[in-house]
Each structure stands twice: as C-alpha cells, then as structure tokens.
Image (tube, grey):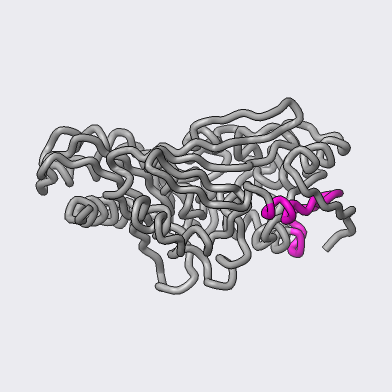
Amino acid sequence: MRPFHYERAATPAAAVKMAGTTPMSPDQPSVATPVQYLAGGTNLLDMMKIDVMRPDRVVDINAIAETRHGGIEVSDDGMWLGALARMAEVAEHADVKHRFPVIAQSLTLAASQQLRNMASIGGNVLQRTRCPYYRDTSYAECNKRDPGSGCAALGGFNRMHAVLGTSKACIATYPGDFAQALIALDARVEITGAHGHRSMAFAELHRRPDDEPHMETRLAPGELITAFTIAALPWARRSKYLKIRDRESYEFALASAAVALDMDGDIVREARIALGGVATVPWRASAAEHEIQGKRLDERALAAAAEAAFADARVFEHNAFKIALGKRTLTRALRETAAMET
C-alpha cells in the first residue's frame, strides 16, 4: 500500500470540504483519484493493497454515522436510509424486511456477516468490479485503470463478465446486489457536494462504459452520497431478490433479479425488474416490465419477458451460458414474487 494522508470528518459538509482541498479532474481514472472517502473500507482498502487505487488523501467519514446519516427511518410514506447505515443493520431491520423485502434480501445475500457488519450501504453501491484484469495490475490492458489501454477481458477468460451494457472498451460486470433492489423500488439517492445538495433517481447514478469505462458514476469529483429514499409504492411489499451463484456462501452473482409487482388478483398492474450479474451496471429491464404489464403471469408472458430482457445481450467466448441462466433466474423470480402473500 502506498503512503497517503488521512483525515476524519464528522459531517458531510466537512468531508466535502476536505475532499475539495485536493484538486480533482472530472475525467481522472480511478487508479489515480487523489481523494477517497473511507467508511467500512471493505472494498477501498482491498483495492489500495493491490495497488489498483492510489489515493493521495483518505477522508474517514465514519463519524458521520453518529448523525442522522447513519440511521434508518421507516414510515407509512416510505423509507429513508442514511448512507452510513451498515448493511447488516438494514438487512436485519424488522420494518425493512416486512415493508421492503427486496432490500433486506439483497443485503443478506451479499458478502459475509462480518463484511455486512462493517460495510456501509453508501459504499456498497459504489463498489468496484471484480474483473480480474482490473484487479491485477500485471495486465496492462484495462480501460478502467488506464483509459485507452484496451480490454484484456475481450480476448481473455470472461466467464463472469457482462452480456448487457457492454462496449468495445469494457465488459466488466457490476458486482453488487443492493443496487438492483434500489432500482426495482424506484429509489432516489441524495448527494452532497461543493455546490450543495442534490437528488437523482438511483437508476441514473451509474454510467455504462461506452468509450469511458473509468467514468463509472455521475457523481462529480468530491461528491458524497448521504442517503437513499424509497417511496412506499404499491409494489414495495411484493418484492423479492433472487441470486444465482457458483456457491451459496460469499460469492458474486452469475445472474440475479430484483422484482417488485403490483398485482390485481393474477393480473400485473405494475412491474419493476432489475438484473444483476449479467450487466456492466445495475440493469433496469424495462422491456421485460412492458411484456407483463396488464397480463397474467402465465408461461407465455414469462417467456416473453425473459426474451425481452436479453434481446440486446452480447456474448463472449466463455459467458454465453449467462443468457439462458439469466432468463431462468428472471422467470423464477417473477413466479415467486407473484406468489407472495402481502
């Protein structure tokens, strides 16, 4: 690990001010980003140890957890999650499990209990890809680490890589689970930066790789995620997260689906679907939603939704199986969500 300057902040405004004292370019690659915020550190410290991330300054924001931004607030209107709340706290919260089950399930199925006790939900949605060519600096070709250098995964072993949202510059898979649940519930993210506070739909936070894979989100330099908000919409209680992986314990998804349904008997009034393990970003499957809206979830509708979800998929040498697996994962998630008692 390389030397760095360490500071501690007790409020979001103080953290942003500390980050702002180090000049940052908007298009700077992640490996050279001069300032990083430290919460649980379960991803950042790993990346620093393997020399993939090399911040000049680390701003410790854990003290912010003592404010509202470490809390969980659930009411009849919806839910407010402070970004410094720990994954385990949110996953085990009784009201979250009852009113927003997809949120609790996505967090419970992520990482290990020890990591969930440490990791913040704000840091979780910003975790970096587990692409081995990104994480191993002996591979020179990685457009996420070194823009313009190429993508070693295109001609390498790419079993875990994405089939949706890829580009000629990057096929790395977004590794998280919680983000898909947030998309399925139309969550919003609150952000603090040098120019004040702003809010955006969570589905707009992550950027597809296109020609700039190192630009992973729409956060401006120094901006800090402070909270997530989720309205108590009709489909929130009838929601589920299904994760398929090589092993049941502490493994990233080969394919996953976050589904939320508003049902009128056996007719789908509204549907929200997000896919994980198969895409470069947390993936909203809008075409699949359209296929089942206003319909019974019979085999024909399920098949149409699955086909629509992967209509634009692009496979590579070792990951073609993800299309069939992704379709089966989605149809199973839809069936099980529709069968839920709310």
**Residue 66 occupies which quadrant of the picture?**
bottom right
In the image, 160 versus 151, the foreground residue is 160
Q: Residue at x 35, y 37 (%)?
A: 312
Q: Is residue 58 magenta?
A: yes
Q: Is residue 205 above or below residue 157?
A: above
Q: Is residue 225 above or below residue 198?
A: below
Q: Position of residue 225 (x, y in %)?
A: 63, 41
**Quadrant (top left/top right/bottom left/bottom right) for the N terminus:** bottom right
In the image, 181 versus 13, the foreground residue is 13
Q: Is residue 67 left or right of residue 262?
A: right
Q: Position of residue 123 (x, y in %)?
A: 62, 52
Q: Residue at x 41, y 46 (%)?
A: 163
* Residue at the outermost front position: 75
Q: Residue at x 13, y 45 (%)?
A: 297
Q: Position of residue 11 (x, y in %)?
A: 75, 44
**Residue 261 occupies which quadrant of the picture?**
top left
| Residue 16 appears anywhere in the view | yes
Q: Is residue 280 magenta?
A: no
* Residue at the outermost top position: 195
Q: Residue at x 37, y 60 (%)?
A: 243
User: What range is drawn magenta here?
Assistant: 48-66
In the image, 294 versus 341, the foreground residue is 341
Q: Position of residue 149 (x, y in %)?
A: 69, 43
